[in-house]
Image: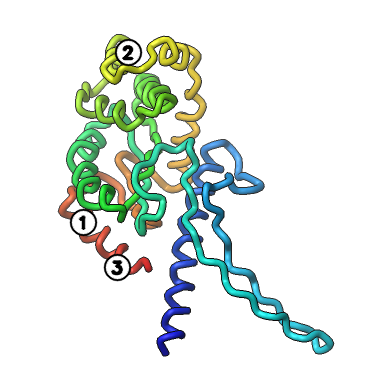
Amino acid sequence: MKKAASCSQERARSRSWWLRGTAIVLLLGLLLGCAPSTPPTPTKQFVAPATPTKPSPTQSAPTPTPAASPTPFAVPEELPSKGSPEAKVFIVEFSEFLCPWCARFATETVREVEKEYVNTGLVQIIFIDFILHGEPAVLAAEAAHCAQDQGQFWAYHDLLFDNFVGNAYSREQLDGFARKLNLDMAAFGRCLDSRKYQIFVLASTQVGEDAGVEGTPTIFVNLQMIPGFVPFAELKPIIEEELKNTP
């Protein structure tokens, strides 16, 4: 019985990582404008369970081989993420830097999630842009991704939401946030002036629309969609339930 329980847990854990990997691959495929013919190469290769085949009467049964241990599917580097790739729960957050409820979610709920779950390795957060307020919101998102080029997406993300203005950030403000983080201003300026991430940001919105997102913030806790602002007190039991149900 003990062995059977162990096998059952392993199958459940394999399915958990399969769902995680599938969700992230589909998100990235949509984000790049087409479904990938092969998934992005992860840092640790996820091995899907082999489909059993029934031997013909003339064939002998194949020698069983030990099942490979499932390993996490790494989040593609194009998508900003924080937290352990081995976390049991992943939260995909669709957000916008000119959305007031997104600012509140980022400065209140997300920071509590980070303290209690991300920093302890239980939750991974993945951020995807979802544009509702036109060109000013696109430019702010592009600036955050230009900061990401220098390893500072989350710090820039925090500055945008901590200094939320509600309608538009001026170029002077966007540059000022970059200076505050001691970014290479020449590289940041070239990135923003060239609109390097414009298509990426606009495609991100299409990802959300294809996933059924209609407004911001909208999050997916594992594969459960939760639209609108969620206080930490309401999100906590959802995370706890996912942690309990995920091997």
Amino acid at pointer 1: Lys
Residue 35 placement, left or right of 247 = right
Where is residue 235 shown, x and y percent of the image? 22, 54
Picture residue at 23% right of the left edge, 24% below the top: 166
For mark 2, what is the residue? 175
Q: CA distance from mark 2 to mark 3?
A: 44 Å
Q: Nearer the viewer, mark 1 or mark 3?
A: 3
Q: Earlier in the sequence, mark 2 or mark 3?
A: 2
Verify CB contact (< 8 Å) between mark 2 and mark 1.
no
Amino acid at pointer 2: Asp
Where is residue 30 shown, x and y percent of the image? 54, 42
Q: Residues within 10 Å of mark 3 (few under 14, many from 20)?
A: few
- The foreground one among 8 and 119 is 119
Residue 236, label in figure? 1
Verify CB contact (< 8 Å) between mark 1 and mark 3.
no
Residue furthest toward the left?
A: 233
Residue 65, label in figure? none
Secondary structure of the residue carrying tag 1 is: helix
Where is residue 231 shown, x and y percent of the image? 18, 48
Amino acid at pointer 3: Lys
Q: CA distance from mark 2 to mark 1?
A: 36 Å
Residue 244, label in figure? 3
Picture residue at 37% right of the left edge, 39% below the top: 127
Residue furthest toward the right?
A: 58
Q: Quadrant of residue 12?
A: bottom left
- The foreground one among 187 and 56 is 187
Q: Earlier in the sequence, mark 2 or mark 1?
A: 2
Q: Earlier in the sequence, mark 1 or mark 3?
A: 1
